[in-house]
Amino acid sequence: MKYKITIKEILAKTIEIEADSLKDAEAVATKLCNNCDVVLSADDYVTTEIVTL
């Protein structure tokens, strides 16, 4: 029998953003990610999850 297994590696980085509101800070973070100004690497590894489909 064959099984489909998904392996997810989770990376995370916390950055400080100065803004007038949480919504503005999230918009800045999104822009930074979209422009590749914040790049996650193996140093940002948090955990691995195994998911059975």
Image: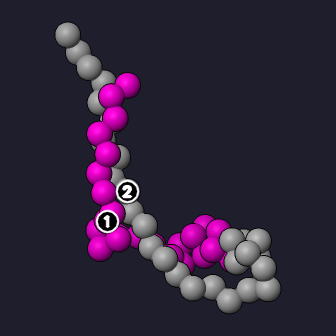
> Does the segment drawn in magenta span residue 31?
yes
Disc 1, disc 2: CB below 8 Å?
yes
Q: Amino acid at mark 1?
A: Tyr
Image side of residue 10 versus residue 1, left or right: right
The x and y percentages for residue 28 are 69, 77
Asked whether residue 31 appears in the rendered view, the answer is no
Q: Amino acid at mark 2?
A: Ile
Which residue matches tag 2?
10
Secondary structure of the residue carrying tag 2 is strand
Image side of residue 7 versus residue 28, left or right: left
Mark 1 to mark 2: distance in Å? 6 Å
**Quarter that holds the C terminus:** top left
The x and y percentages for residue 25 are 70, 77
**Quarter that holds the N terminus:** top left
Q: Nearer the viewer, residue 20 or 38?
A: 20
15, above or below 27, in the image: below
The x and y percentages for residue 22 are 73, 75
Image side of residue 26 versus residue 12, left or right: right
- Residue at the location (33% across, 28% down)? 52
28, above or below 8, in the image: below
Which residue matches tag 1?
45
Please provide the residue range marked out in magenta.
28-53
Asked whether residue 4 appears in the rendered view, the answer is yes
